[in-house]
Image: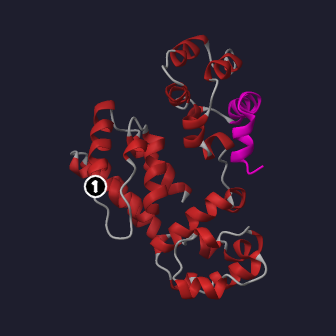
């Protein structure tokens, strides 16, 4: 999953500004196949490559998200990039799914997520729901998982990531930081951006970066500009941003961390 997200992002970052806008416009016109829903137009508006990557993986999963990206790239005459995505699809299909690699840990250590899976029919839900503990619930759920296709497993993975994010990060061995994991929520919901930027001024923002970001007309626009820099930051700079957010937007940080 991490590899797919990384390669999809790298592909989208190769698009120029005009090409990226064409990609977004075409993406908004895609009618997804049965079982999927169209991407929300509000989220697509002014979306940068990381936001587009997150939307594709969140709504369509790894396999279909990559298929959609390849289709759109072909539609805007980006054949070479479309072929790169198709190679990614082949590589992902050859890999074991998250649940095949971490089945026992997920069974033992997750918190309740049953009500959010939206993958169970009424009979399955009624059979699993009465279990007394999360572990017993997951044991029952995993009796069904082996028969599921990749799309169903990907959708359960998304629910698990939303409800048990720390566990997923640990099991995947990922190095994603808080500011990476909650990128979209932070862009949309952080307040007092002028104060945030003042606290970041000097380190990690140099004067030129500070002035450029400060010209944003809204909190969202300023956060979008800030996140153009975040992917290139090391952990020290991301820690600094996290501490500033704790100072200026503590309630939001607590909510995102589940406190």
Question: Few, some or many C-alpha atoms within 10 Å of disc 1 (few <14, some 14-19, many ≥20)?
Answer: some
Colour scheme shown: secondary structure
The residue that appears at 26% across and 51% down in the rendered structure is 29
The residue that appears at 33% across and 70% down in the rendered structure is 34
- Please identify the quarter of the rendering in which residue 66 is found: bottom left
SS for dot 1: loop
- Please identify the quarter of the rendering in which residue 2 is found: bottom right
Q: Position of residue 43 (x, y in %)?
A: 43, 43
Could you say which is closer to the camera, residue 144 or residue 126?
Answer: 126
Is residue 57 at all visible to an observer of this figure? yes
Q: Is residue 45 magenta?
A: no
Q: Is residue 63 above or below residue 179?
A: below
Is residue 204 at all visible to an observer of this figure? no
The residue that appears at 69% across and 30% down in the rendered structure is 241
Q: Position of residue 96 (x, y in %)?
A: 54, 72
Q: Quadrant of the N terminus?
A: bottom right
Q: Is residue 101 above or below residue 40?
A: below
Q: Position of residue 86 (x, y in %)?
A: 34, 60
Q: Main secondary structure of the magenta part?
A: helix
Q: Which residues are magenta?
A: 235-259
Read off the residue under disc 1: 30
Q: Position of residue 131 (x, y in %)?
A: 74, 84
Q: Is residue 52 above or below residue 199?
A: below
Compared across the picture, whether 76 is left or right of 24 comes to left
> How many numbered callouts?
1
- Please identify the quarter of the rendering in which residue 141 is found: bottom right
Compared across the picture, whether 167 is left or right of 215 comes to right
Q: Is residue 253 magenta?
A: yes
């Amino acid at each position: 999953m991490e590899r797919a997200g990384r390669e999809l992002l790298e592909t989208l970052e190769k698009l120029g500004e005009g090409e990226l806008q064409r990609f977004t416009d075409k993406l908004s016109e895609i009618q997804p196949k049965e079982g999927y829903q169209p991407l929300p137009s509000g989220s697509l508006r002014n979306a940068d490559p990381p936001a587009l990557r997150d939307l594709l993986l969140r709504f369509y999963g790894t396999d279909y998200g990559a298929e959609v990206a390849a289709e759109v790239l072909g539609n805007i005459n980006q054949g070479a990039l479309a072929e790169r995505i198709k190679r990614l699809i082949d590589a992902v299909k050859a890999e074991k799914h998250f649940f095949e690699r971490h089945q026992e840990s997920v069974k033992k250590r997750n918190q309740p997520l049953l009500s959010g899976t939206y993958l169970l029919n009424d009979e399955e839900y009624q059979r699993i729901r009465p279990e007394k503990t999360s572990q017993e619930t997951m044991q029952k759920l995993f009796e069904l998982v082996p028969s599921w296709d990749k799309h169903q497993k990907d959708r359960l993975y998304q629910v698990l990531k939303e409800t048990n994010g720390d566990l997923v990060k640990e099991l995947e061995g990922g190095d994603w930081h808080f500011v990476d994991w909650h990128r979209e929520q932070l862009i949309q919901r952080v307040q007092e951006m002028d104060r945030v930027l003042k606290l970041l001024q000097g380190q990690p923002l140099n004067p030129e970066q500070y002035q450029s970001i400060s010209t944003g007309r809204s909190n969202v626009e300023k956060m979008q500009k800030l996140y153009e820099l975040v992917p290139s930051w090391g952990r020290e700079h991301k820690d600094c941003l996290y501490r500033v957010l704790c100072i200026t937007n503590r309630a939001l940080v607590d909510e995102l961390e589940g406190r």
